[in-house]
Structure formats: structure tokens, C-alpha cells
Image: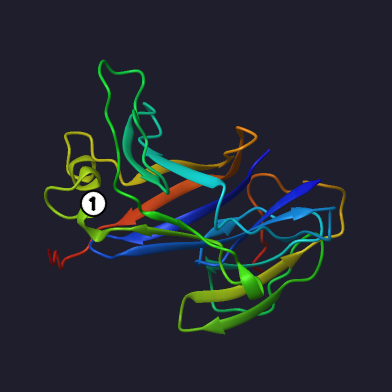
Amino acid sequence: MAIKVEVVTPVSVVSAVEGASTAISVVGPTQSPITTNREAAVVNVVGANMVQNVVVSTTEPSNPYEGLVWIDIS
Amino acid sequence: MAQSANFIWGQGEDLTVELIYKEGAPGSEIVVDLSSGYQLRMDIVVPATKERVYTFNSASISDIDPVADGAQPDSTLEGELSSGVGDTPNIVISVPRALTLPGGAVYSKMTGGTPVLVFGYDIFLRHVSSDRQAKILTGTIATEESSTLWL
């Protein structure tokens, strides 16, 4: 049995687990799109330096992202 | 291993942490009714020393710090557990602004000789009847100093 915690309160960094789809907030340059090295991310750009509503999802084996989720902003 | 999430907390703000706790087969987790039979505890600590700064709980605790001599009961309940019906948050933790304002436990750390602005935390959930508990979330809370300190 798996345990899953969805964080509703905006956070800066969150871990993603298998099948998870979690909204997170990150600060970065005003540029879109942001992509992860796994599944695609969806992003809205608001303001000069704020990127929010990044949705990270993965079908990788369980718990591939324990710890930080790295997001390339290029 | 527990999931992690890092929060940002503006000094002087009331912080509300809302979580949806689910269990089930991987990929098919469903919301768990936490309205009865469960208890929650979340401690904020200084990362370098693990010194406990504050405890958030959903039920009274007879001794929050068993390491120190004597009982230190805590009957202030900042955590609220609910049914989560309709995929609404079944865990809501209300973090009072007073903690980051003068006289607050977090304020004293933010303004101490070695100021601490980032705190560690983890959250445990206990199923009372089975006496089983699990760490469900861990991470940091980064405080942002404010100019306005409205008590």
C-alpha cells in the first residue's frame, strides 16, 4: 500500500512519486516552457521573476524523486 | 521514505498548511477519513542542532519533550484532521503569526546571536487503535523577514 500526501499550500520544492501530480511554486527567470528531465511540466509565468503552477508527473518506478525535483530553466 | 515539501513563511503571516493524505495501491490512492481515530504531530526544529522550537498537534500531548526533565504538556491544538470528502484537505495545520513576532519562539531564533531563518520539520500521523504511526512529510520552512511586525 502506498501513502501519498498532496500539498495544497504553495511550496518551493516538493518531491514527486510514482503517479503523482503535484502543483509547486518555483522562482526563476521569466521564461517558458520549463521542462523536467522526466515527464513534461506545465507552467504559467506571472510577474517578472515568478514562475508558478509547475505540474510534475512521472510514471517512473516508485519514489524516483525522493528529495529535490530538479527543474532546468533554459 | 516520507515525501518532502519546503514552505516559505513570511514573518508576521499566519501560515496555513493544507494537505490531502491518501492511501492505496500505487497510482490509485484515495483520501483517508482522518476525522476520528488519528492524531498528528509536527515539530519545527533548528536544523543544525535539532533543537525543538515548536510543536503542532491535533490532540493533547502529555510530554512534548521527553528528553527534558519533567512533563511538558501541550494542549494547544493547531492541527485539524477531517474527512477529506471531495478531495478537500483532510489535514490543516494553522501556524500562528505570533511565533514569528516579538515574544514568539521562532522570533527568538530569527534574532538570536546566530540567527536562524530556515527551520526543519517533519509530520507524523498516528492511527490510535493500532498504535501505528508514520512520518508522512518532511522538509524545511524558510522564514522571510518582514518590515511590518504587526502583533
Location of mark 1 (residue): B99
In the visual, does A69 lie left or right of B62?
Answer: right
Few, some or many C-alpha atoms within 10 Å of disc 1 (few <14, some 14-19, many ≥20)? Answer: some
x%, y% of residue B120?
Answer: 43, 41
In the visual, does B151 lie left or right of B33?
Answer: left
In the visual, does A50 lie left or right of B32?
Answer: left
Placement of the C terminus of chain A among the 4 image quadrants? bottom right
What residue appears at the point 64 percent right and 45 percent down from the top-left corner? A67
When asked about the image quadrant of residue B98, the answer is bottom left
x%, y% of residue A42?
Answer: 70, 77
| Residue in front for this viewpoint, B98 or B8 | B98
What residue appears at the point 65 percent right and 78 percent down from the top-left corner? A43
x%, y% of residue B10?
Answer: 31, 62
In the visual, does A49 lie left or right of B114?
Answer: right
What residue appears at the point 23 percent right and 51 percent down from the top-left corner? B99
The answer, for residue A64, to whether it is visible in the render is no
Q: Which residue in the rendered view is the most extreme toward the top?
A: B69
When asked about the image quadrant of residue A23, the answer is bottom right
Q: How is the image coloured?
A: rainbow
Q: How many marks?
A: 1
The answer, for residue B50, to whether it is visible in the render is yes
Q: Which amino acid does label 1 sit on?
A: Leu
x%, y% of residue B115?
Answer: 24, 40
Q: Mark 1 lies on which chain?
A: B
Asked if residue B130 is positioned above or below residue A47 in the image, the reply reads above
